[in-house]
Image (cartoon, rainbow, N blue to C red):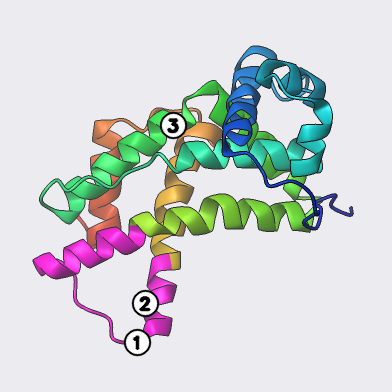
């Protein structure tokens, strides 16, 4: 399936105010209508802009929803709670709460499903959500290394692999727990997960 993700187009500079209104309207429509009934016309009406304004910015619903959801993930912050385990617990609780929001849950699951048939859309999800949120792993590792909780890594390639793997383990576990299994990522589960993450499968329960 060929993606409709557009190349950049000439014209007037984009308005940050209009972009914010459109993305907020998209999330509002996801809550009220769900993925299947959401249309660009409805989003345009809610945002108070012309439908052509949306098409100048986004090729279609998939790309629009990716950006609307990605903006939510940008709200995640890594707390400085005094230890690596406490820092991870804090950000995972935020992540789980975010995935519990209807606009995030329905939008994310829908575009991930669509991306199985659309490689450019998959790349957009990777760039807009995954790569941007690896900042949390980078920050957490740097802070833990400064505390002496983790050893430094001098090899940039090895460090990049560690960051990728850590992100995959944390994000994958939380997404599976909340969206696939439909179970809460609550305090007891998060603490058990962190124990395994930091100490390995040989860690006592």
What residue does disc 3 label? 98
> With 50 as the anchor, is 23 left or right in this view?
left
State the residue at coordinates (66%, 21%).
47
User: Dot 1 surroundings within 10 Å: few (below 14), some, or many (20 or more)?
Assistant: few
The magenta region covers 137-163
- Which residue, given by chain and number where applicable, does mark 1 sit on? 155
Residue, far top = 32
Q: Residue at x 64, y 41 (%)?
A: 66
Q: Nearer the viewer, residue 92 or 78?
A: 78
Indicate whether 102 appears above or below 197.
Answer: above
- N-terminal of the pair, mark 3 or mark 2, is 3
Which residue is pictured at 17% across the width and 46% down the height?
A: 86
Q: Position of residue 201 (x, y in %)?
A: 30, 59
Residue 22 to residue 190: above or below: above
Q: Quadrant of residue 190?
A: top left
Q: Which mark is residue 177?
A: none
State which quadrant residue 16 falls in. Answer: top right
Q: CA distance from mark 3 to mark 1?
A: 34 Å
Q: Which residue is mark 2?
A: 159
Circles 3 and 1, Cβ within 8 Å, touching? The answer is no
Q: Secondary structure at mark 3?
A: helix
Q: Residue at x 62, y 35 (%)?
A: 19
Q: Secondary structure at mark 2?
A: helix
Q: How far is disc 3 from disc 2 in space, using C-alphas?
A: 28 Å
């Amino acid at each position: 399936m060929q993606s409709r993700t557009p190349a950049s187009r000439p014209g007037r500079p984009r308005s940050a105010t209009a972009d914010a209104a459109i993305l907020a309207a998209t999330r509002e429509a996801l809550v009220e209508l769900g993925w299947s009934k959401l249309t660009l016309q409805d989003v345009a009406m809610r945002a108070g802009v012309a439908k052509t304004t949306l098409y100048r910015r986004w090729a279609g619903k998939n790309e629009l929803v990716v950006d609307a959801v990605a903006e939510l993930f940008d709200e995640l912050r890594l707390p400085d709670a005094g230890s690596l385990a406490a820092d991870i617990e804090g950000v995972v609780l935020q992540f789980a709460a975010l995935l519990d929001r209807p606009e995030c849950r329905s939008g994310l699951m829908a575009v991930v499903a669509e991306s199985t048939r659309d490689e450019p859309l998959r790349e957009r999800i990777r760039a807009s959500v995954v790569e941007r949120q690896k900042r949390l792993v980078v920050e957490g590792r740097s802070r833990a290394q400064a505390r002496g909780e983790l050893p430094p890594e001098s090899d940039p390639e090895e460090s990049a692999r560690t960051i990728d793997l850590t992100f995959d383990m944390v994000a994958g576990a939380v997404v599976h727990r909340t969206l696939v299994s439909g179970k809460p990522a609550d305090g007891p589960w998060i603490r058990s997960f962190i124990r395994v993450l930091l100490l390995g499968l040989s860690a006592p329960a």
